[in-house]
Image (cartoon, coloured by chain):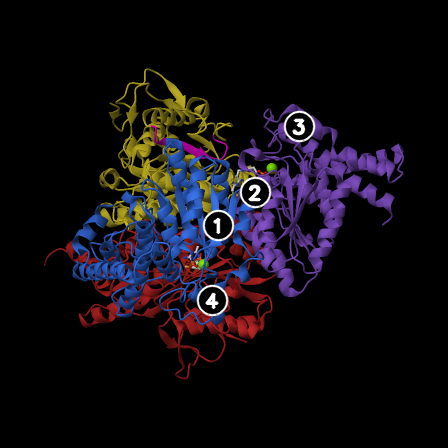
Chain colours: A purple, B blue, C yellow, D red
Amino acid sequence: MDSKQFLSELYRQLYTIRVFETRCIKLYRQGLIRGYFHPYLGEEAIAVGVCAALEKRDYIISTHRGHGHCIAWGAELKRMVAELLGKETGYCGGRGGSMHIAQIDSGNLGANGIVGAGIPIGVGAALGSSIRGDDQVTAVFFSDGAANNGVFPEAMNLAAIWDLPVILVLENNHYAVTTPIEQVCRTRDLCERSKGYGVESFTLDGNDVLEVYERTKAAAEQCRQGKGPVLMECKTYRQMGHHVNDPGTYMPKDRLEYYLAKDPVKIGRKYLAEKGDATEEEIARVESDVETLLEEAVQFAKDSNEPDLQKFLEEVGSCQ
Amino acid sequence: MDSKQFLSELYRQLYTIRVFETRCIKLYRQGLIRGYFHPYLGEEAIAVGVCAALEKRDYIISTHRGHGHCIAWGAELKRMVAELLGKETGYCGGRGGSMHIAQIDSGNLGANGIVGAGIPIGVGAALGSSIRGDDQVTAVFFSDGAANNGVFPEAMNLAAIWDLPVILVLENNHYAVTTPIEQVCRTRDLCERSKGYGVESFTLDGNDVLEVYERTKAAAEQCRQGKGPVLMECKTYRQMGHHVNDPGTYMPKDRLEYYLAKDPVKIGRKYLAEKGDATEEEIARVESDVETLLEEAVQFAKDSNEPDLQKFLEEVGSCQ
Amino acid sequence: MPVNDTSTATVATNGREIMYREALNEALREEMSRDPAVFCIGVGIGDRGGSYRVTVGLLEQFGRKRVIDTPISEASFTGVGVGAAITGMRPVVEILFIDFSMLALDQIINQAAKYRFMTAGEGRVPMVLRTQGGAGGALAAQHSQSLEAIYYHIPGLKVVMPSTPYDAKGLLKAAIRDDGPVIFLEHKLLYMTKGPVPQQEYLVELGEAEVKRSGNDVTLIAWSNMVLRSLSAAEKLAEEGIDVEVIDLRTLVPLDANTVLESVRKTEHVVIVQEAVRRGGVASDIASMIQQEAFDYLDAPIKICAGKNTPIPFNLRLEAACVPQEQDIIQAVKNALRHQQRRVPPP
Amino acid sequence: MPVNDTSTATVATNGREIMYREALNEALREEMSRDPAVFCIGVGIGDRGGSYRVTVGLLEQFGRKRVIDTPISEASFTGVGVGAAITGMRPVVEILFIDFSMLALDQIINQAAKYRFMTAGEGRVPMVLRTQGGAGGALAAQHSQSLEAIYYHIPGLKVVMPSTPYDAKGLLKAAIRDDGPVIFLEHKLLYMTKGPVPQQEYLVELGEAEVKRSGNDVTLIAWSNMVLRSLSAAEKLAEEGIDVEVIDLRTLVPLDANTVLESVRKTEHVVIVQEAVRRGGVASDIASMIQQEAFDYLDAPIKICAGKNTPIPFNLRLEAACVPQEQDIIQAVKNALRHQQRRVPPP
Ligand SMILES: Cc1ncc(C[n+]2csc(CCOP(=O)(O)OP(=O)(O)O)c2C)c(N)n1
Ligand SMILES: Cc1ncc(C[n+]2csc(CCOP(=O)(O)OP(=O)(O)O)c2C)c(N)n1
Ligand SMILES: [Mg+2]
Ligand SMILES: [Mg+2]
């Protein structure tokens, strides 16, 4: 893949997540999406950079803030929107919703409503690969809040002692809901927590898609060499509150503006223009293609049927 | 307390635990003690050193290998033996047994059958002190295996962010049942796990009662100054298998001999003789006093009644 | 001296109506003011005032020492509650969703529930674990469970599930004063419901059910949000001439078997309504108790109207189909009464 | 082709008797040999061969990749099992004591049990969680619990509790082949019990109860260790002229309601024996099901003979008093029959 095409692809992904979230937030406000919706706005470069550095045969496991991971991993927008709308055509037939989207056949093992719970599950996927002797890597996404669930160190240790091919992608967006990371952690960098387990770790700029990509590439290489897990702490920031309905007033303005200036989508656009030598027109075409696709997806989802109640009740009735 | 008296007291404790465990193992083999019995032989200096450095108002919390902690904290031998024999006069009226001995009124919050579970409970005791503004320290005993239960890092973090007066006493005896620590941990020292939480930690010779005492004194001082928790990794070794019935054949002979040569009771005796200027006769008196007390305790326990079945059933019946 | 009574009627409310969540907030404020040993701990309870705004304003009033925001470490901060309780405090631990309490069950089941017993009564764990369950609002499988049966089965735990603001306040105050441990289960759909709550202090004792509607034809037993649905079903049934007695258990442990049995002996027909799935639920246990204690009074099998045997789906229509609705309750009552007719010989 | 049958009689055993733990060991060996996706993981299962020696020799035969000793990290290694299962493996996770499984319930209840449902059937968790419960040998409150009711209540989990070496082997093999997740509950007092187990391969299907003794006077329902005690109680009762039918449920989920109801319709009297505490136990649920489905056949209340409502004490005499003993079962059967006599008009 030549650099321009590659950068264009990265940008397409970044832009897709951005407009997907923005559009779906609208659908939420219109009452078409219900339940929980945790936007990934501002963190796009992590999902895109990580997924671009992995192979099709690899696994990812996601979180409650998971739309970006799904899209970067190649999910179809129409089945994504349909799931958020609770439709039969969604990835989980309307059973899962935003917090449980999965695309198992592709290796996306799914989002999770329990903060931190995906970490051991991801390590388990890697254990399976290791037992089978398959050359697969598992990337586990989680954020700073999840790093306080005991399963993070526990599962990291398991990956370490068994030299499992796991990339622990800590998306440090500095908040767990309204709780700032400084309030629940004495150290500056969460990645220091890996040292006591003999696991390599580092921080990186989570808003820079190329940095994320490069570091993931290297980490995946190490994993495939059988050297065990790597913890990457990607520093980032949410561009809005925790949840669609959270105005995020507790986020200091200057911090927010600092990160807005480092907007991952803008950075990706700049890379495409500067490193990829793409013209404004070419970039605009990428963007309009994405927008078209998304509108089709929204239409598809709106037109889709609700899950069939009778069929559902039969399924349930036949279960013990 | 002058040095001789102090060293004599330390030795008395060390020797008490030694003969208590030895004698009770005999009772176990005679079928008088049932259930689980995890001897503390070889680790006596930790309990004795830690407890000697604390104040009466402080708290300790113990483990499944907890007889030594109780004794060093001042438990009455007769109520200890009685509990192991399941008698009405035991500390828990025969309800608890070896794994659940507690002496709450004295500040010993009890042993625990769930490896690691005492750690957050101990942190909670310290939180209570902190809320009340009481000048108390809580010492939490646990071993290397417990350090792999996620509540260890979780609870250590809570103690850290709230600056709680907790001394985490990691009795690294290098085994969890038959699992050698190297098999479940990539690093040499478990105390490194505290670094990622901004918690001070160090290793020390867990067989040297004075070293344990001095380091605990300093740690307690820091705690009382409001600087938060300290993790002390006390290197030690079991002098026999995990459990009374475990021959411990998997323990490499040279390692075992190395530690037998560093026997904590012998070291304590040497301190008393050399630093305390005690004569062989004086030491022998300490020993024979302990032995007498223990025999009385055993007799007391044997003579004690079984818990009253009728009374028990009434208690149970009246509970919802 | 607080009035120690169990029925809404006794304490004059002077028309004051407040929300369930406000009633809980008042209970916490009053108990924290009364007793310096009481403190609150949980995720997002301080600065944020709680996801459902139950703890709003407590931080301002009582400060960070007694209103403690925690990291996402459910197992450990529950254990911290246990340790604080053992040593003389009265913690009110909040776990955001009952689903997340699965992370803390070692501390609840193996530690808190057994401590007093294992120490032959020497130890006490006067802790309240507040959490919240039930389906509603498309929160899907991991945020909608009704898991009271787990706690109900464990000796040493008390389990409280209030349905009204009045009971919520009085029971939470009583729970905080109890020797504990008490599992205090709220329902996400109840927080915004309103009801009369007196200005004057009062307690509702643990272990006392309340007949929320009296009737002669059938005994309907419910708790938490199902009480509201049962009461409105009862009104509909009244229009059809079926006179339903609705018992709100309020406390599942200790269970007020007397109130239940007295009613059953009167009506001879029983429906138990439970949001949780039927298999292994609390309703089954109550049914088994009734058939044992009042076998000769029963004119028909005890009918259980319960949640469907499935995790809760995201889609709202499917979600609604998984939990007893008013119509399901009405149908269950009619079914319970129908059996009798089959046994009566035709004229 | 393994014989797919459910009764000991069908497969010739040629007099071979082995222990329950040996039967489990054979099941693991056979399934691991048959399918490279099967692997075992847990604390002390490899080098040590398991606390109860169920996994002895597996490490030698299958190597460290498939017989994995873990640190004391129950929540995570259970989660690791879930992840491996989702991605095509068939893990057999061992948790030493069911008491410790309280540490792993998020992974079991919120993850494993719901994954298939949440993904609309796309995902599968073919995992077996083996663990062990029950009182015996003065192991006290945190190593003696009977907690099957917790798993029984959760949609998405299957629950198996074999009582004989034959069933243990056949059911474990079936559980490993099942789409799962399956909670496989052994009993510490059963490991050393012996029974006939054929050399030839066989499976025992999940969801089929077995009448272990047929009789006409009363249906006695039990599982796990209580089956053995019930059978010996039945022999004693036979001497007094009371003919007891003993049903071993073997699998609690799916529950074989047909076998139970058929027997109940015949005997019209039911005793359910359960080691767990009564409140909220599985027995209550079965009782509630029977009274619903066979109300008109019952001549007396269903009698539940269950563990006392308390954590298990250390002292052996107290321990024994907390769990149904043969004598308690005999008494329960007599009580169940006595009620009838009260209703029969005197001659
Ligand atoms: C175990 C658990 N505790 C609490 C919650 C409620 N909750 C949902 S999201 C969230 C914050 C998570 O923070 P973080 O892990 O940093 O992820 P982020 O939202 O920043 O992506 C919390 C507390 C939960 N879902 N699971
Ligand atoms: C959560 C839990 N898992 C497993 C066990 C079984 N078990 C009892 S003691 C023990 C070893 C504990 O090792 P360590 O913490 O190092 O303590 P030590 O025995 O060395 O004092 C194990 C695995 C348990 N009691 N609790
Ligand atoms: Mg975050
Ligand atoms: Mg150890």
Element under disc 1: helix
| Chain letter, disc 3 residue | A
Where is residue A304 shown, x and y percent of the image?
Answer: 66, 40
The residue that mark 1 highlights is: D109
Give the CA separation, mark 1 to mark 4.
47 Å
Residues under numbered marks 4 and 2 in contact, where contact means CB atoms less than 8 Å apart: no
Residue A97: which numbered mark, if any?
A: none
Give the CA separation, mark 4 to mark 2.
42 Å
Question: At label 4, which amino acid type do we have?
Answer: Tyr
Residue B258: which numbered mark, if any?
A: 4
Which quadrant of the rendered structure holds the C terminus of chain D? bottom left
Identify the image quadrant of residue C24. top left
Ranked by sequence position, the earlier of labels 2 and 3 is 2
Q: Nearer the viewer, residue B90 or D112?
A: B90
Whether disc 2's CB lies below 8 Å from ligand 1 is answered yes
Mark nearest the camera among 2 and 3 is: 3
Residue A238 in the magenta stretch? The answer is no
Whether disc 1's CB lies below 8 Å from ligand 1 is answered no
Residue range in magenta is: C36-45
Where is residue A202 shown, x and y percent of the image?
Answer: 67, 45
* Neighbour tally class for label 3: few under 14, some 14-19, many 20 plus, Cα within 10 Å: few
